[in-house]
Amino acid sequence: MQESDLMPASPRKKPAGKAKKASFYLKTHVSRFSTIVAVCDKQCLGKKFESGGLVLDLGLHRRFYEGELVGEEEVKNALCNAGSINIVGDKSIELAAKALGVSKAGAKKIGGVSHLQVYRV
């Protein structure tokens, strides 16, 4: 037995530039006429939000938002190629504001959660 056999292995380093954890659901809907990107904060999916006569039911409409669970870079890339965007959740809207320069002021609060729609013409 050699001395090196008794030495503990050095800890592995995480790869540089590793994507942030998956915090967003992302789904892209493609039609003949446009591309719609749906982004939703992970913790909002499956819940129902209501206030002032408005309802945002992410349980009933789960299939619209529930695509791939991704990190920030994947969301940014998808947003840049979208014709229309539906965004739910403060983190998702903050990311869209940074990536596209959209105004967070246009977001509606429904039952405490933010919802924003962006259309490119």
Image (cartoon, rainbow, N blue to C red):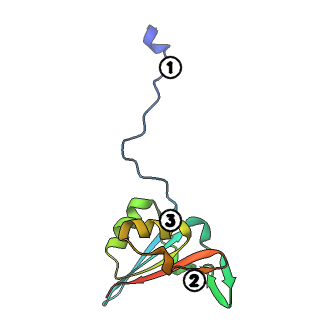
- In the picture, measured across the screen, residue 60 lies left or right of residue 91, that is right
What type is the residue that disc 2 sits on? His
Q: Secondary structure at mark 1?
A: loop
Q: Secondary structure at mark 2?
A: loop
Q: Does residue 106 appear in the picture of this structure?
A: yes
Q: Which residue is mark 1?
A: 8
Q: Which residue is mark 2?
A: 61
Q: Residue at x 61, y 66 (%)?
A: 43
Which mark is nearer the camera, 2 or 1?
Answer: 2
What type is the residue that disc 1 sits on? Pro
What type is the residue that disc 3 sits on? Phe
Residue 70, compared with residue 54, is above or below; it is above
Q: Residues within 10 Å of mark 2 (few under 14, many from 20)?
A: some
Find out whether the residues at labels 3 and 1 contact each other: C-beta distance under 8 Å: no
Q: Nearer the viewer, residue 31 or 17?
A: 17
Percent across and percent down for residue 107 are 52, 79
Percent across and percent down for residue 67 are 48, 72
Percent across and percent down for residue 11 are 47, 28
